[in-house]
Image (tube, rainbow, N blue to C red):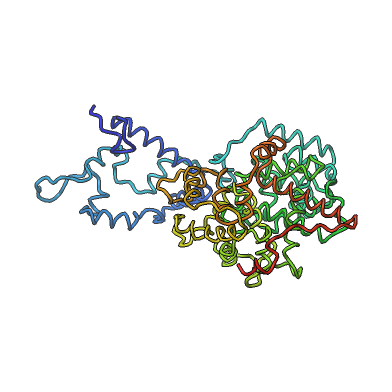
């Protein structure tokens, strides 16, 4: 049998015979047909067709071919009658000269039993062989395309349920915590949320109510999927900001590392909001206030929640939940918010990092170029906006931060940072270095350093993917263009001190190091104030001359 190149069908580089290719296609079609056949909508349709056939009615639900298909055939020069007539039917008219059939190759690949003129209804009945059954609608779905039923796992789960409930019809919250942790594999602080989802009750749960909810929503899911299912609203396919509020309320009430906050409800609320904002910063990649299952699955939030349920020192959980990190963020915001209305103006914001950010950068941020403000007041930055900003500013190794600062520098929004745009931002920092009698760095030297770090395809044409491929060095690039203090600190850095910091805290990222250093500084200031000493840092930009720049 002649062989044809596989590139004519599926791909290049292979040789398949016509028979093998037909068998592969037939197997795939049969698999898809079985999947379609096991769906509830298909079962109802088959039942209707069988009933009409018994009653002698002609059903036209699916007998007519698609109009789009007929039009395509007509445009190709094939009539509808010729397309759907039997190839074995002899012509009644006079013979005509043979014509080249453009569908000859296609007809050779169609099995003989399917080339007959059968209606879709007849084909369906031939394939189904559905026997008459009185309780046909009660037949459960036996094909699960996304999962497999593990009978051994089901037996183990039923054993755990029977052991926890015993002979009781109801159990209290203390015993139900074993259901949450042992059976569901979830954080213990999700216990009351799960109880509310089952029977809207946080004191006791019935065995029948739990089994109904378990079989419908949790039994065939992995623990991470169960966690997502419990946190979100039942009517949504995503987690919103408010969905975390019940969990944070329980955490603040029951976690031993947060007991000291119970005397200050205002700080409890601020801590909860900060934690949720940090979660959305890392998980919500589209920044649309919705965490989808894909976002949740690809994150480490489930593992962090599990650690929260086991670790009593909340500050050891640096991701999302650390109180020390919250304290640093809140104090930074409070220092800038002069009138304490919980909104920051452009002038307030310009004092961040001792006026380290350039005016051009501040203008771009308040023009909402990198991210639209969530504040309800025009030209004001809310606390949520500040939490997002400070994480982008102090840790430039995340995708969110890189995208944020790339938009700031990309003046024409064409996806490319050019030498002109780099010089536009660097010029202001160079002038400020001259004012400080600091030896400026030549722009050419800076560009050469960046080319060596990021390896662009063309010199001085930096695209977003260049930064995403070199996450660890992106901070150097953006700091040189946006923040004078960080530029000077990088030029005057002590390599031995940098190495010691890495050795002392090898698992710290840039954000962890910043939060650690700032918390130590704030703690020292608070201690000095308690002893009657006032700490005043040397801020050369808090004078009239600096405001003229």
Where residue 246 sits in the image (x, y, percent)? 76, 55
Choose top left, top right, bottom left or bottom right for residue 510. top right
Left or right for 310, reference 90: right
For this orientation, the residue located farthest to the right is: 531
Q: Nearer the viewer, residue 249 or 79?
A: 249
Choose top left, top right, bottom left or bottom right for residue 88. top left
Q: Nearer the viewer, residue 183 or 533?
A: 533
- Residue occupying image coordinates x 29% and y 39%: 110
For this orientation, the residue located farthest to the top is: 1
- Residue occupying image coordinates x 90% and y 58%: 532
- Residue occupying image coordinates x 48% and y 50%: 464
The C terminus lies in quadrant: bottom right
Residue 515 vertical position relative to residue 155 in the rendered view, above or below: below
- Residue occupying image coordinates x 13% and y 46%: 99
For this orientation, the residue located farthest to the front is: 437
For this orientation, the residue located farthest to the bottom is: 378
Count of number-bearing discs: 0
Q: Nearer the viewer, residue 81 or 31?
A: 31
Where residue 146 sits in the image (x, y, percent)? 55, 41
Residue 319 vertical position relative to residue 276 in the rendered view, above or below: above
Where residue 542 sits in the image (x, y, percent)? 70, 64
The N terminus lies in quadrant: top left
Q: Nearer the viewer, residue 203 or 400?
A: 400
Left or right for 80, reference 344: left
Left or right for 168, reference 426: right
Where residue 390 sits in the image (x, y, percent)? 66, 56
Left or right for 463, reference 187: left
């Amino acid at each position: 049998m002649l062989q044809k190149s596989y590139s004519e069908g599926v791909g290049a580089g292979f040789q398949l015979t016509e028979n093998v290719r037909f068998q592969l296609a037939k197997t795939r079609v049969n698999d898809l047909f079985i999947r379609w056949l096991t769906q509830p909508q298909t079962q109802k349709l088959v039942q209707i067709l069988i009933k009409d056939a018994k009653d002698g009615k002609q059903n036209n639900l699916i007998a007519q071919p698609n109009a789009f298909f007929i039009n395509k055939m007509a445009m190709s020069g094939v009539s509808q009658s010729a397309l759907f007539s039997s190839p074995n039917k002899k012509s009644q008219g006079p013979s005509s000269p043979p014509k080249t059939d453009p569908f000859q190759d296609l007809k050779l690949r169609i099995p003989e039993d399917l080339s007959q003129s059968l209606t879709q209804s007849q084909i369906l009945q031939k394939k189904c062989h559905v026997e008459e059954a009185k309780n046909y609608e009660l037949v459960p779905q036996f094909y699960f395309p996304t999962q497999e039923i593990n009978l051994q796992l089901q037996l183990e789960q039923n054993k755990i349920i029977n052991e926890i409930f015993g002979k009781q019809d109801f159990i209290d919250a203390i015993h139900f915590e074993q259901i949450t942790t042992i059976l569901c594999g979830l954080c213990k602080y999700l216990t009351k949320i799960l109880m509310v989802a089952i029977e809207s009750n946080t004191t006791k749960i019935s065995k029948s109510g739990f089994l109904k909810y378990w079989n419908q929503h949790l039994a065939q899911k992995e623990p991470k999927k169960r966690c997502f299912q419990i946190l979100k609203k039942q009517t949504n396919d995503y987690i919103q900001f408010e969905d975390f509020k019940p969990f944070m309320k329980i955490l603040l009430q029951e976690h031993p590392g947060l007991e000291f906050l119970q005397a200050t409800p205002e700080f409890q609320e601020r801590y909860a909001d900060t934690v949720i904002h940090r979660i959305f910063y890392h998980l919500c990649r589209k920044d649309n206030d919705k965490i989808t299952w894909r976002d949740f699955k690809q994150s480490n939030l489930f593992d962090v929640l599990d650690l929260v349920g086991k670790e009593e020192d909340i500050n050891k959980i640096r991701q999302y939940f650390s109180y020390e990190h919250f304290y640093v963020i809140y104090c930074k915001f409070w220092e800038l918010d002069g009138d304490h209305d919980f909104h920051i103006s452009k002038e307030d914001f310009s004092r961040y990092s001792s006026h380290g950010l350039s005016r051009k950068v501040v203008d771009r941020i308040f023009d909402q170029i990198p991210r639209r403000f969530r504040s309800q007041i025009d030209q004001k930055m809310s606390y949520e906006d500040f939490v997002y900003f400070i994480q982008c500013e102090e840790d430039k190794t995340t995708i969110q931060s890189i995208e944020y600062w790339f938009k700031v520098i990309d003046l024409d929004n064409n996806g490319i940072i050019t030498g002109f745009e780099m010089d536009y931002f660097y010029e202001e920092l160079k002038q400020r270095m001259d004012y400080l009698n600091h030896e400026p760095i030549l722009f050419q030297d800076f560009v050469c350093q960046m080319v060596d770090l990021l390896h662009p395809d063309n010199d001085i044409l930096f695209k977003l993917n260049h930064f995403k491929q070199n996450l660890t060095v992106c901070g150097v690039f953006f700091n040189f263009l946006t923040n004078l203090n960080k530029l000077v600190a990088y030029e005057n850095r002590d390599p031995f001190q940098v190495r010691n910091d890495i050795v002392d805290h090898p698992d710290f990222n840039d954000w962890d190091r910043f939060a650690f250093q700032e918390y130590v500084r704030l703690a020292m200031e608070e201690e000095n104030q308690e002893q009657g000493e006032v700490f005043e840092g040397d801020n050369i930009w808090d004078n009239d001359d600096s405001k003229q720049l």
